[in-house]
Amino acid sequence: MREGFKKFPGVRVYISASRKTPDGKPDRCFYIRYKLPGGKLVEEKIGWASEGVTAIYAAQIRAERIRSVRLDEEVVPIQKRLKQQWKFSNFMEEHYLPWAREEKALKTYKREEQVYRIWIKPVLGGKTLKEVSPFDLEKIKKAMKDAGRSERSIEIALATIRRAFNKAKDWGVFEGENPVSKVKIPRKDNRRLRFLTPEEAKALLEEVRSRSKQTYEICLLALHCGLRFGEITNLAWQDIDLAKRIIYIRDSKNNTTRTAYMTDEVARIFAGKRPGAPEDYVFLDRKHGKIKWLSQVFSRAVKKLGLNDGVTDPRMRVCFHTLRHTFGSWLVMQGVPIYTVKELMGHKTLTMTERYAHLAAEPQKAAIKELEQLVNTVSKGNVVSLKQD
């Protein structure tokens, strides 16, 4: 219920039915009303009585607003002003990092927490979100570079800040341009190059299956359907349509929904499971909750098979993502059009899929062979006729 004050025109109070003051009385929230140039009526929340706000204080703020409107000054509402005063360190430690711990892979969370604690907090910790500038981010880049940190480490630090500001905007505690957008981010080409041969894939899956049935099933989904680890662990029974042999990937890495298709082996896996409730996860950890990281079974299988022996380039090492990369590579090698591969893998842009294009080089090689035959014929002095379209 809202009431007005005769003594303080333009000040209104909302009496809460559930919120209480420390002395047990119903809490009251104060609002003010004033008009902008052109006559638009604005109602602005000032705050709660339990926070020390009074009708007199609200009336004073209203008088300031009217004065600012009359002098054509910018009017910044109190709640927006409070948002602009959020400390970067408070936001990271009380909101972003706790959220990341629950929603992201454990490895990703630990990496972000470490880079924040060592490199980001010393520079940005005492600033408000609004005060963080591109110049501050350049300081972080320089400090990390001077300390001998790799370009990849610098990229991770800036990506962490970018994601934090994006979340602050999503949660309504920051307005404005993300400061990272004004900074050049060093990027190293760390895209996976290694893909498995059919013989390697068979041996790896058999080794994993001998150790863990569930890890084998997760690996098979990556290899046969091109799913990311997070997409697999997010699968709920409502996403599995065994009759149509379809898997619905909701809210993927690119915040889109796509469809994956089951091979015979994948269909047999789902057919052999006892379905849970529609919202239940298909794959569960030992505590019957969502899986947050990949079992060590996979890395132990890779080690036993020696797939990474003598390999120093990270792009050529076999990891779980290699299974998804193998899925895309095999499709292209079988002549599947690049655009179709893009859709099946859930890539946001065709550029991401074009890394596989060199695997579809057989038509180009055949064309060069034909040209070579023509060149050899001409070099021997023979006259040949060219094919006409």
Image (cartoon, rainbow, N blue to C red):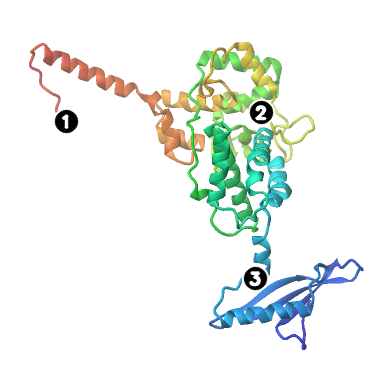
Kind of element beneath mark 1: loop
Q: Earlier in the sequence, mark 3 or mark 2?
A: 3
Any part of residue 278 in sight: no
Q: Residues within 10 Å of mark 1 (few under 14, many from 20)?
A: few
Amino acid carrying mark 1 in the image: Asp
Residue shown at 64% from the left, 16% from the top: 301
The image quarter in which residue 235 lies: top right
Q: In x, y percent, where is residue 180?
A: 53, 48
Residue at 68%, 42% in the rendered image = 100
Which quadrant of the structure image shows residue 129? Answer: bottom right
Which marked residue is nearer to the observer: mark 3 or mark 1? 3
Q: Are marks 3 and 2 in contact (CB under 8 Å)?
A: no
Res. 186 in view: yes
Amino acid type indicated by mark 2: Ala
Q: Nearer the viewer, residue 136 or 312?
A: 136
Residue labelled with disc 3: 77
Residue 303 is situated, as x and y percent measured from the top left of the image, at: 63, 14
**Residue 221, quarter of picture:** top right
Image quarter hosting the C terminus:
top left
Closer to the camera in the image, 238 or 104: 104
Residue 271 is labelled as 2
Picture layout, residue 258 above or below residue 51: above
Position above or below: 277 against 196: below
Q: Secondary structure at mark 3?
A: loop
Q: How far apart are the alpha carbons under marks 3 and 2?
A: 58 Å
Residue type for callout 3? Pro
Distance from Cα at disc 3 to Cα at disc 1: 72 Å
Can you identify the residue that label 1 sits on? 389
Is residue 23 or residue 182 the one in the foreground?
182
Task: Please determine whether, in this image, residue 287 is positioned above or below residue 194.
Answer: below
Which of the two discs, 1 and 2, labels the residue nearer the N terminus?
A: 2
Residue plotted at (45% across, 26% down)? 331
